[in-house]
Image (cartoon, rainbow, N blue to C red):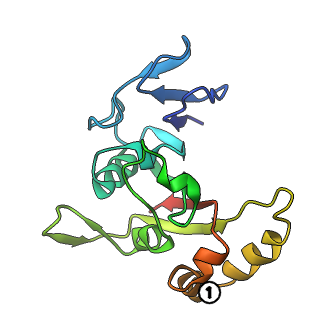
Amino acid sequence: MKKLNLGCGTDIKKGWVNLDKFKYNDSILVHDLNKLPYPFKDNEFDQIYASNIIEHLEIEFDKLILELWRILKKNGILTIKVPHFSSVNAFDVFHKRFFRFHDFETLNKESYTSSLERKRLSLFKIKKIRITFEKKFPFWYNYIIEFLVNLTNLTKTIYENTLLRNIFPAKELVFIGVKN
């Protein structure tokens, strides 16, 4: 299996292609992640892991998703982790955008080929979209909050569209999808 660790930073994964803009060590393939296309063939990877990198990129989200879809094999797994918009971590000076549950929910419905033109695609079968919460002391109550928020898509929508997001700020969003 060929796996890509996109925007790896110093989180080097053994047995993976570790791609980043900066060469932290010799095992990193260097490429500016804002420049498309990425230096890979179509359908090259069985798995792509992008943890806390997408919010840093200046390229449009839909173009990035289409590029990841291009280099992922059929039935390949895409895992994306980003700070949830209610998280204090979302407001980092280097972050270019915020994310909510619905940003990832649409990946199995449609993708935008431009900001004006919509093209119906079924890019991914969604395995999981989870809103996570900090659960270290003293935030143990967030085990219950996380369970309740993630019961259904409706509970996620209610959470994001009410003051609950301010009372119980989330940590991150985790998306796992399988390429159709």
Considering only vertical position in the picture, is 136 above or below 112?
above
Residue at the far top: name it.
26
Q: Nearer the viewer, residue 78 or 31?
A: 31
Residue at figure coordinates x 20%, y 61% from the top left: 113
Residue 150, x across and y down, in percent: 67, 77
Considering only vertical position in the picture, is 47 above or below 81?
above
Q: Left or right: where does residue 135 sit relative to residue 28?
A: right
The three-letter amino acid code for the residue at tag 1 is: Thr
Q: Quadrant where the C terminus lies? A: bottom left
Considering only vertical position in the picture, is 98 above or below 13?
below
Q: Quadrant where the N terminus lies? A: top right
Q: Determine which residue is flagged by label 1.
A: 155
Residue at figure coordinates x 45%, y 74% from the top left: 102
Residue 167, x across and y down, in percent: 65, 77
Q: Residues within 10 Å of mark 1 (few under 14, many from 20)?
A: few
Q: Left or right: where does residue 32 sit relative to residue 118?
A: right
Residue at figure coordinates x 39%, y 52% from the top left: 69
Q: How many marks?
A: 1
Residue 34 location, quadrant? top left
Q: Left or right: where does residue 129 sit relative to residue 29?
A: right
In this orientation, does residue 76 appear? no
Residue 11 location, quadrant? top right
Q: Nearer the viewer, residue 96 or 79?
A: 96
In this orientation, does residue 121 appear? yes
Q: Secondary structure at mark 1?
A: helix
Residue 7, x across and y down, in percent: 48, 35
Residue at the far left: name it.
116
Residue at figure coordinates x 17%, y 65% from the top left: 115
Considering only vertical position in the picture, is 80 above or below 142?
above
Residue 25, x across and y down, in percent: 56, 13
